[in-house]
Amino acid sequence: MSILLSSIVAGLLFGMVLAFISLGLTIIFGVMDIVNFAHGEFLMIGMYTGLFTAQATGIDPLLTLPVAALVGFSLGVICYYGFIRFLLRGPILAQLLGTFGLMLLLRNLALMIFGSEDRALHKGILVGKSFELGMGVIIPATKAVVAGLSVVAFLAIWLFMNRSRVGKALTATALNAQGARYMGIPTERMNALAWGIGVATVTIAGALIVNFWPVNPFVGILFTMIAFTIVALGGFGSIPGAFFAGIIVGLITEIPGFWDFITYTFNVGWMADVPMTSLKYMWVYLTYFVIMVLRPRGLFGWKH
């Protein structure tokens, strides 16, 4: 039973972490209908920002979040005005290839500047600490804090989008940019704001997960694909959908734990020979494929 409970708790925590990473991707797609292949590289930049800020200043990694947010917001706005707004004038293929090129540019710049080796934080108020809930369930403090801040971030973004004038202007731009311009909404600024907020959320997430995940220039590949799965499952542009889809995907990544529970509880010999741990991300990508075939709009999709 402890295997089952540990897997459920671990899946919920990791799911909220993944949802946090995907939040910026769904904001940007929701406003501009553009698929940002460089999302994982912005996460990588946030991780390096948190790591180097903590090491250079000696402050706790949690206190680096404002720096990561500032770097992310500035980078998002610069990318929009310097690059993305020109892509929006072209066909969808140009947008896809453009953000793919941005991904390669950022990744190779990081490779040239930081090298390919893994870097990790070894100290901090949360690093190496955990809580025991009983029945063998142990929660790492780093993941618990990221999960809690993920909930706060989703609530804050949802309230901003639905209760503020600027958020409603963003929603109007997402629904009909031309109509929003006729109503006097500066859609160019709204697009830049969406990019700023979207990139800032993922760099904050990066500065948090570097507390328990090593960073290198290629770390964004894994999280980009998972973020696409979450956004597709939740519904492109749906903020609540991204949260619940993140939890679902987090539980999917814990299939090896559920597999072990069934294997040892019911003593199924052949299941013990299946290397399920090495296949866990296969189930995530299989879910992505099935969703795209059966329900392209996702579970909470609101845009056609």
Image (cartoon, rainbow, N blue to C red):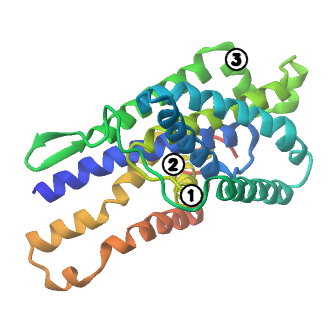
Marked residue nearer the N-terminal end (2 or 3): 3
Hey, which quadrant is residue 79 in on the image? top right
State whether residue 118 appears in this view.
yes
The three-letter code of the residue at mark 2 reads Leu
- Residue at the (27%, 43%) spot, across then down: 128
Residue 218 against residue 298 in the figure, above or below: below
Q: Identify the disc placed on residue 295.
A: 1
Q: Secondary structure at mark 3?
A: helix
Q: Amino acid at mark 1?
A: Arg
Disc 2 to disc 3, C-alpha distance? 26 Å
Q: Are marks 2 and 1 in contact (CB under 8 Å)?
A: yes
Q: Which residue is mark 3?
A: 166
Which residue is depicted at the point 85% across and 29% down? 188
Q: Nearer the viewer, mark 2 or mark 3?
A: 3
Between marks 3 and 1 in the image, the one whose residue lies nearer the viewer: 3
What amino acid type is highlighted by mark number 3?
A: Val
Left or right of 29? Residue 180 is right
Badge 2 is on which residue? 299
